[in-house]
Every structure is written in C-alpha cells, then in structure tokens.
Amino acid sequence: MAFENFLTQDKSAPTKWRRITYSLSLGLHAALLVAGAIYSFWHVEELSPPSVSVTFLAGAPPPPPPPPPPKRKKTPTVIKKPVEVVQPRPSQIVQPKEKPPEPEEEEDDGEEGGVEGGVAGGVVGGIIGGTGSGPVNVAPNIGANQNITDMNDPRYRPSLPAALNRGGMVVWGLFKLCVSVQGGVTSVQALKPADPLVDQDWIAKIKLWKYKPYTVNGRPVPFCTNVRVQVTATN
C-alpha cells in the first residue's frame, strides 16, 4: 500500500505544477498584451506630411513680330473733266458777237492822178472796185439780193441729219463766200461753224449756189459776202 501511494504521489505532483506554470504563463502573456495595447494608445507617433516641391518649367518667350512694311505713297489720280459741248437751245438763236470797230485810218491825200474813192496802193487810172485789188466785200443784204439759187431744190438747201432733226431744234452757222465774175461760188469759209455733223455738207451745198454778177461802174467784179444759214428741225 505504501508503495502504491508513492507511485500515486509522484504522478499527481507534476500535474499540479504544470497547471500552475500554465496559469502563470497565460497570465504573464495576457499582461504583456494588455501593456502593449495600452502603450500603443498612449504613444502614437505623429507622421509629418511629406513636403512636395513643384517646379514650373516655362519656355523662352516668342520673338517680337517683324515691323510692318512701309506704306506706299498713293499717287494722286487725275480725273479728267469731260468737255461739255453746249448746243444752242431749240428756241434760242445765238447772235454772232459784233466785232469791235476798227480804228479809222488817217486820211491820205492819195496818189497824184488818182480817182476819188479809190483804194490805197491802187493803179493810177484804174476802175474803182475793179479786179486789180481782188474781190470787193459787200454787205450781207446786198449779197443776198445777188443770190439766184432755188432754195426749194434739196440739192442746194442745207438740211439736218436725223441726230439733229428733233422737235424745235434750230441750228445755224455763219459763212463767208466769194463769188467769181461769172456768178459761181469759188470759196467758202466757216466763220461760225454750225455743228460738226452738218458743216461739211452745208459748205458743199453753198459751193453750188449761183449769183448774179456784181457790177461796179457797169463792169462785173468778183465779190465776197457773209451769209447766215439757219435750219429749223421739221420733226
């Protein structure tokens, strides 16, 4: 019996110490865990925020623009004024301007043996108004009395072209004509042209006119006179 008790005592003692060791070990580990948890709450390390530096890189500024080209000088444009051709009004007749009176020549005693009424430089013994000094000038009314042309004949009568033959249009011109001894017109000069459209046609028709011979002291002589031609539109 005593031996069996010994065997039983030896086996129960280790079991009791084991339990005590386990209990202490567990209590110690639990205390360490609790202490670690409390320490972690009380000692929190503040983390400093990271410093971030930003660097901006900018390129070089663009070069300045080139200067503008020099302005060209404008050449002034010359505007030509149109030349106005003034036509006489249909109901208006423009009278030719009167020439200023020529200064009177001093009286000359004339040549010895000359005839009273002769011209200076004439031939002694010649006829007054003779052909020695060229055609004589006669007044327009005298020249008109010498005209024997049939003005009803369209070959001799000045007329107007369609461009001027408008209602109320009056076209006139002043011409100087010279007549031979036989009564034919030798030359025509426009002193006051009528219109470029009719001048040449009117001169051609005036050259066909016929005149009575103009006589001086019973002898026919050539003469020159002025004639005014006026035509009124018929349309």
Image (cartoon, rainbow, N blue to C red):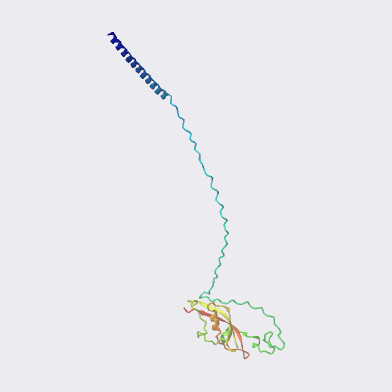
Res. 173 visible in picture:
yes
Residue 2 place in picture, x, y as percent:
28, 8
Quadrant housing the N terminus: top left
Residue 177 place in picture, x, y as percent:
58, 83
Residue 41 place in picture, x, y as percent:
41, 24
Label tally = 0
> Going 61% across and 86% down the picture, which residue do you hit?
223
Name the outermost residue toward the bottom. Answer: 218
Residue 148 place in picture, x, y as percent:
54, 87
234 horizontally vs 212: left or right = left
In the image, is residue 77 above or below residue 35?
below
In the image, is residue 220 above or below residue 176?
below
Which residue is more in the foreground, 94 or 54?
Answer: 54
Which residue is more in the foreground, 31 or 133?
Answer: 31
Name the outermost residue toward the left. Answer: 1
Name the outermost residue toward the top. Answer: 2
In the image, is residue 25 above or below residue 204?
above
Name the outermost residue toward the right. Answer: 112
> Going 36% across and 18% down the picture, which residue do you hit?
25
Res. 142 visible in picture:
no
Which residue is more in the foreground, 76 or 53?
Answer: 53
235 horizontally vs 223: left or right = left
